[in-house]
Amino acid sequence: MNKSVQNALNDQMAPQISGLLTDTYKQVQSMPEMMHGIMLMNAANTFSEKMKGTYPMMVLQLKLKFGEVDLKSEEYESAIDDIVHDALSKYITNLPAKGSKAQKDEDDYYGDDF
């Protein structure tokens, strides 16, 4: 993915996720503090999944803006993950490093002993 496409994705999505997380944070202030991170991560996940479903439309928008665009769906999803990670890191300090994958299922998490 070239830098102009990456910047266009960031310019479009970063304010959206930032606004969503700001609104969510304000809404959860009446909840116990332990719920804040859960609610923020839930909002971020919902945003991420929604945006990942817009890949064909986003490619079309980028083609209209830049001409021919070589953007694979994996690159698009990775860019979304990075944008969401950056936004969440303003609220949650112990996030896994960018690009690290969460455990995919219980077997991986608990290992062979469980």
Image (spheres, rainbow, N blue to C red):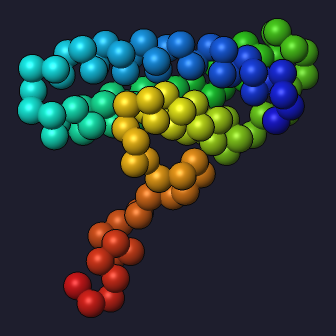
Instruction: Give the residue at the far top of this rendering.
Output: 65
Image height check: is 66 above or below 59?
above
Q: In this view, does 5 lie to the left or right of 89?
A: right
Q: In this view, does 70 lie to the left or right of 73?
A: right
Q: Is residue 31 left or right of residue 112?
A: left
Instruction: Give the residue at the far bottom of this rendering.
Output: 113
Q: Taking the image as drawn, is residue 60 in sight?
A: no
Taking depth in this image into account, of 34 and 80 the one nearest to the observer is 34
Asked where in the image residue 29 lies, by quadrant, the reply is top left
Image height check: is 104 above or below 35?
below
Q: Position of residue 103 (x, y in %)?
A: 41, 64
Quadrant the C terminus occupies: bottom left
Q: In this view, does 70 lie to the left or right of 53?
A: right
x 57%, y 24%: residue:
54
Quadrant the N terminus occupies: top right
Q: Position of residue 19 (x, y in %)?
A: 42, 12
Q: Where is residue 69 in the image (x, y as percent from the top left)?
A: 85, 26
Taking depth in this image into account, of 20 and 73 the one nearest to the observer is 20
x 57%, y 19%: residue:
13
Instruction: Give the residue at the far front of this rendering.
Output: 93
Image height check: is 56 above or below 42?
above
Q: Taking the image as drawn, is residue 30 in sight?
A: yes
x 31%, y 31%: residue:
40
